[in-house]
Each structure stands twice: as C-alpha cells, then as structure tokens.
Amino acid sequence: MGDFIIEGGRALRGSLQVQGAKNSVLPILAATILHNGTSTLHNCPRLRDVDASMRILRHLGCRAEWEGDALVVDAASLTRCDVPDHLMREMRSSVIFLGAVLSRCGRSELSMPGGCELGPRPIDLHLSSLRQLGAVIREGGGRLHCEAPEMRGRELTLSLPSVGATENAILAACGCEGTTVIFNAAREPEIADLQTFLCAMGHKVQGAGSSTITVEGRSPTHDVEHTVIPDRIVAATYLAAVAGSGGEVELRGVDYRQLSTVTAALHEAGCQIHSTGNAIWLRSTGDLRAIRPVRTAPYPGFPTDAQAVLMAALLRSKGATVFVENIFENRYRHVDELCRMGADIRVEGRVAVVCGVERLRGAAVEATDLRGGAAMVVAALSAEGESRISAVHHIQRGYADILGDLRQLGARAREE
Ligand code: UD1
C-alpha cells in the first residue's frame, strides 16, 4: 500500500455525492443474518471494514458478493456460529455479530475485540444487555462463549447510550420471544437506518432515533432491498477540508439535519453555509476565526468522529479554540502529527487547545487512526507544499475514495 501525497494551498471547488455510511452498513451487514434469505444493499461504500464484514459473513457460510453497485448477502446457507480470532481482530465493530449470531443460532462464539487506537473500548454494556435477554456468556482465553437456548424480551436500561451496545441489543431482541424495550438507547441516525433495514425485512422495531426503542421479537422475515444512508462523517470531513483550504463545495445526498452541530461550528468560524433539501453548500475564504469550545457528545451532540477534522480545519484560524473530548479517552493521537505541520495544539487530558498559526507546512506524517488520518488530509490540503501521509490503511477503513473525491474538487492528491 502506498502513501498519500498531497500538495496543499489550493482552494477546493465543485460538487460531490457523499458515499454511504460506514457506521450504518456494518451493523446492517451483521443484521443480514437475521433472515434466512437474501438482502440487497444499495449505496454501500467499498471500504476495508466492509470487506472484513463480508469475510465474516462468508466464514459463517453466507454468500456475500458485489453485484454491480449492490452488495448482496444470502444468509440461507449459514452453517456456523463462531467468528475466528483473526477475523475479529480486523475490525473492532465485529462485536456487532455477537447479537446477530445469537439471534439467528441461539449460540455464538467470538473472541474479545482487541483494544484499539481510541483507548480502552470495553464491551460490558453489550454483554450485560445480552445476559439480561437470557444469554449465558462465559469469558475465557480471550473468547466469548454464548449460549441462549431461550431468549426472552424484557426492559433494558443502558447506563450510557453506547451505539454498539444499542445495536447489539436490538439484533438480539429480534430473536427473543416477546417484547424488548431499550431505555437510554443511543440516538445516532445509523441506528435509525438499522431499524429501517430490519423493518423492511419484517422485524418489528420502533423508536430508533429516540432514547427508547421497542422490539417485538421473532417476526417472520422476507427478502429485503435497502439503500444505506449517506455518511455524515465523510460529509463533515469534506466540509472541514473546504473550510480550511478555502473554496466552495456542494455535497449532494446529505441530510443537513444530521450535521447541524458541525455546520454550526463551521459557520461560527466564518464559513457561509446553506442547505437545500438533501444537499449542503459551503463557501470559505480559508481565513477562519476561533470558535467557542467544541464538546463531543452522543448524538445529537457534536460527533466525536468529527472532532479531529474540525480541529484540522481550525489550525490556521485567528485565536484559540478549546476542544473537550467526552466520548473516548485517547482521541488526540493526531495532535502530534498535526504539530509536525506547524500546528500549535496543547493537550491536557480530555482538553485540547488549538492556537491558530499563520501557516502550516507540508510534512511527512503518519495516520494514527481513521478520523485522525482524515484530519491529516484536511490539514495537508491547507498547508504550504507537499505532505506525505503514511499508514493510510486506517483512512481506507472509512473512506471509499478520499483522494478521488478531493481531486474532483481540484485538489492535487495522489497515492504513491
Ligand atoms: C460507534 C461508532 C464510532 C463512534 C462511536 C461514538 C460504529 C461502527 N462506530 O462506536 O465511529 O466514534 O460510536 O459515536 O458505529 N462503552 C463502554 N462500555 C460498552 C460500550 C461502550 O464503556 O460496553 C463506552 C466506550 O468506551 C466509549 C463510549 O461508551 O467511551 C461510547 O462508545 P460507543 O457508543 O459504544 O461506540 P462504538 O459503538 O464502539
């Protein structure tokens, strides 16, 4: 795999269609096994994490293939209920297969998803939800052995609105006898997309998007076609890129309501922004000002996944902006790399203070994680000279063609 070479200092102009959402498609791919037949997914991005999910599905005995632009999964031939360690390690969100496999097979065996670049990411809420629904889970030798001969719906309360735990609970509840009500559920739009998919398949799920979700289990299912929602974090990345570099962009296929905290921040920084139906238009001179503190929070708060790219857009702004990262402990790994480009950022625990600098210089940097890597792309676009970004496999986990998209906006960017 090559490095990304980006020549900065050019304004970005043009119009782009935004890819389907990674965080929608991964739980939906796990959910395909809740039907003994075919699911056809449209607007599914071609990502490394999608490939990893397809490998898990194939290991389970399903057929998972691209047919033109659609991803088709046939889960009628599912024969296994385990996910081996090497497949679990490829992608942390593989833990979402736990609830889905339990739902379909009444048992499952997975390894613990490893720690990851964002600090410890426990799965205690996933496990306690599944246990409350009747699963008996033994942990040993890095493996999770789950048996659930009888799963019954009941009321569950999550102690915090975890996205993955909410999704796992929904998937498991689809296989339960009776009704499950999930309180303090996460409200992310991707959970609403999972609900749309499951309902189209025949399951009875309602309330996603609010903090109370109700699932009536064991509904009859049928073949389903579904179009994945657009990726709000990819949209936020491109808006941040144009904000930082200057220029004018129209992003098509985006639900502006899902991006309101990001567009509000960019507007406060001095960008002009309009939304028309399902498109967002942004114009920036590239001369931004610092903004009020940005505090990440569960949806509908400011997304933790957009923290790094907004920070990258503000590196040359006038004044100082405070970021408070409330979701993950270790989500400032991009900071040291951005400083190599001349940024002035200080981190103390969950708080980072960005003092705007006059100019950024192109540099050799390493993508530290998915969104941190995207932040380096955003910073490189507004830096003087050339940047080389290595370890871009992190970026390719979540962006189908970030360089192609940016070239469409006039950026000088290539893989070497
Ligand atoms: C999902 C997204 C990720 C996003 C995150 C927060 C996917 C595939 N990934 O990740 O891009 O950054 O939501 O919006 O959708 N926690 C526990 N115990 C648990 C589960 C979570 O303590 O059992 C904590 C986590 O450590 C973290 C917080 O809850 O501090 C939020 O995590 P969660 O919402 O679960 O994130 P993910 O589903 O892993």
Image (cartoon, rainbow, N blue to C red):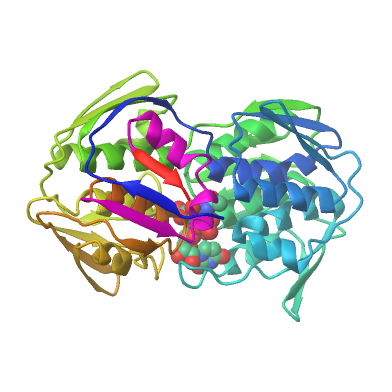
Q: Does the magenta segment cover residue 238?
A: no
In percent of width and height, residue 110 lies at 76, 65
Taking 117 as reference, is 49 above or below it? above
In percent of width and height, residue 95 lies at 66, 59
Q: Residue at x 85, y 56 (%)?
A: 106
Q: Residue at x 32, y 55 (%)?
A: 387
Regarding residue 182, the answer to whether it shows in the image is yes
Going by the image, does 391 lie left or right of 78?
left
Taking 187 as reference, is 11 above or below it? above
Regarding residue 208, the answer to whether it shows in the image is no
Image: magenta residue range: 384-411
Most foreground residue, 2 or 145: 2
Taking 137 as reference, is 286 above or below it? above
**Residue placed farthest to the top in the image?**
277
Question: Where, quadrant-wise, is the N terminus in this rendering?
Answer: bottom right
Most foreground residue, 362 or 179: 362
Going by the image, does 289 lie left or right of 184?
left
In percent of width and height, residue 218 lies at 80, 40
In percent of width and height, residue 160 lies at 47, 60
Q: In the figure, residue 145 lies in which quadrant?
A: bottom right
Going by the image, does 412 lie left or right of 135?
left
Going by the image, does 374 lie left or right of 262?
right
Taking 119 as reference, is 174 above or below it? above
Q: Residue at x 80, y 47 (%)?
A: 177
Q: Residue at x 79, y 43 (%)?
A: 33
